[in-house]
Amino acid sequence: MRANPCLACGACCAHFRASFYWAETDDATPGGVPAAMTEKLNDFFLIMRGTRGPEPRCEALLGDIGAGVRCSIYERRASICREFPPSWEDGVQNPRCDQARAAWGLTPLAPEINPEPSPLPRAA
Ligand code: SF4
Ligand code: SF4
């Protein structure tokens, strides 16, 4: 079994704004995204704290980008995080994964990597 590349990356959690519908939080959904870790984007959408601005980094991300990371709210992360696959998961390239890694000086994942399902981000 190959190691999950996201555990040595985290770039997308520190590159994109992670926005999602407000009702995904525990204000409306038991066990949902901790509302205390979000902020308002508009009347319908929230973002993960830390992902706004020119140097985003989600407050839920622990560790060092490109070395070792984990999502502190993995089981409660938003749909946008769950639906962001690393490149070549199930044989499909994700250009946004490649883009985030490039922004952090990391090479794109190779097609051969065939990773396990990601424990990490999924940012918008
Ligand atoms: S999805 Fe891509 S950019 Fe995000 S942590 Fe995984 S390998 Fe890194
Ligand atoms: S996967 Fe976790 S650390 Fe990454 S953006 Fe989503 S909540 Fe933040």
Image (spheres, helix red, strand yellow):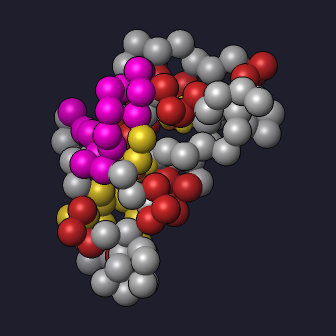
Relative to 79, 60 lies left or right? left
Q: Quadrant of residue 30?
A: bottom left
- In the rendered structure, does residue 58 fall within the stretch colored magenta? yes
- In the rendered structure, does residue 80 fall within the stretch colored magenta? no
Relative to 83, 12 lies left or right? left
Relative depth, front residue between 48 and 74: 74
**Relative vertical location of residue 90 with respect to residue 52 in this rendering, above or below:** above
**Relative vertical location of residue 40 with respect to residue 104 in this rendering, above or below:** below
| Residue 52 in picture, x, y percent from top left | 22, 47
Relative to 36, 103 lies left or right? right
| Residue 79 in picture, x, y percent from top left | 52, 63
**Relative vertical location of residue 92 with respect to residue 42 in this rendering, above or below:** above
| Residue 10 in picture, x, y percent from top left | 42, 33
Relative depth, front residue between 65 and 94: 65
Residue in view at x 25 percent, y 48 percent? 59
| Residue 68 in picture, x, y percent from top left | 41, 27
Q: Quadrant of residue 93?
A: top right
Is any atom of residue 59 visible in this view? yes
Residue in view at x 39 percent, y 58 percent? 73
Q: Quadrant of residue 38?
A: bottom left
* Magenta stretch bounds: 55-69
Relative to 82, 18 lies left or right? left
The quarter in which the N terminus is drawn is top right
